[in-house]
């Protein structure tokens, strides 16, 4: 995905939608919250495309604002890396983990869009982390 990072906005510009997005993102780190993308993927082995789209939109929303606490950035890295690991495990014939609904249609969208979108979000997150560490 060849998107240019949006101009980042100051913390003063944050509004309720950003805090709500952070709330939903932080819920994904809790494997016991059954309404999250991560719960469905890790516990139920279901790739919920609607929740995935919402997750990405929330990440895109929060990454426009600064400053962002390092722990919150680590949460984004955790979500992305665990999702990648789940998809890779699904394709690994020696791994017992499979995503029950990861059919050819979802796989095609993963290869054509979802993977690139997640890579972009990971790159943006790391860019912010690196900038934060060099301050």
Image (cartoon, rainbow, N blue to C red):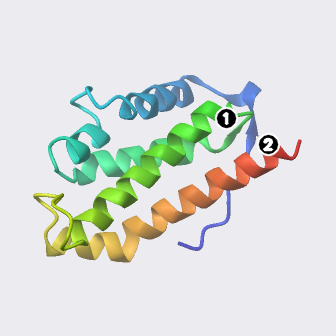
Mark 1 Cα within 10 Å, few/some/many (few <14, many 20+)? few
Answer left or right for 54 relative to 15: left
Residue at label 1?
70
The secondary structure type at the circle numbered 1 is: helix
Residue depicted at 53% across the width and 47% down the height:
77
Task: Report if residue 7 is visible in the image.
Answer: no
Residue at label 2?
132
Pick the front one: 126 or 113 = 126
**Image position, residue 61 (x, y; %):** 55, 42
Residue depicted at 36% across the width and 77% down the height:
112
**Image position, residue 10 (x, y; %):** 77, 34
Residue 29 location, quadrant: top left
Label whose residue precedes the other's in the sequence (1 or 2): 1
Quick check: marks 1 and 2 in contact, CB under 8 Å?
A: yes
Residue 24 location, quadrant: top left
- Residue 99 has which mark? none
Q: Is residue 21 above or below residue 85?
A: above
**Image position, residue 68 (x, y; %):** 69, 34
């Amino acid at each position: 995905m060849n998107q240019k990072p949006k101009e980042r906005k100051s913390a003063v510009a944050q509004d309720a939608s950003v805090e709500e997005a952070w709330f939903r993102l932080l819920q994904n780190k809790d494997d016991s919250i059954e309404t999250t993308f991560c719960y469905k993927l890790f516990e139920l082995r279901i790739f919920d495309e609607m929740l995935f789209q919402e997750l990405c939109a929330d990440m895109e929303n929060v990454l426009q604002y600064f400053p962002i606490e390092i722990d919150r950035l680590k949460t984004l890295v955790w979500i992305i890396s665990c999702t990648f690991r789940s998809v890779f495990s699904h394709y690994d014939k020696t791994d017992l983990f499979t995503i029950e609904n990861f059919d050819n249609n979802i796989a095609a969208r993963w290869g054509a869009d979802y993977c690139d979108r997640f890579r972009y979000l990971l790159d943006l997150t790391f860019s912010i982390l690196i900038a934060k560490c060099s301050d």
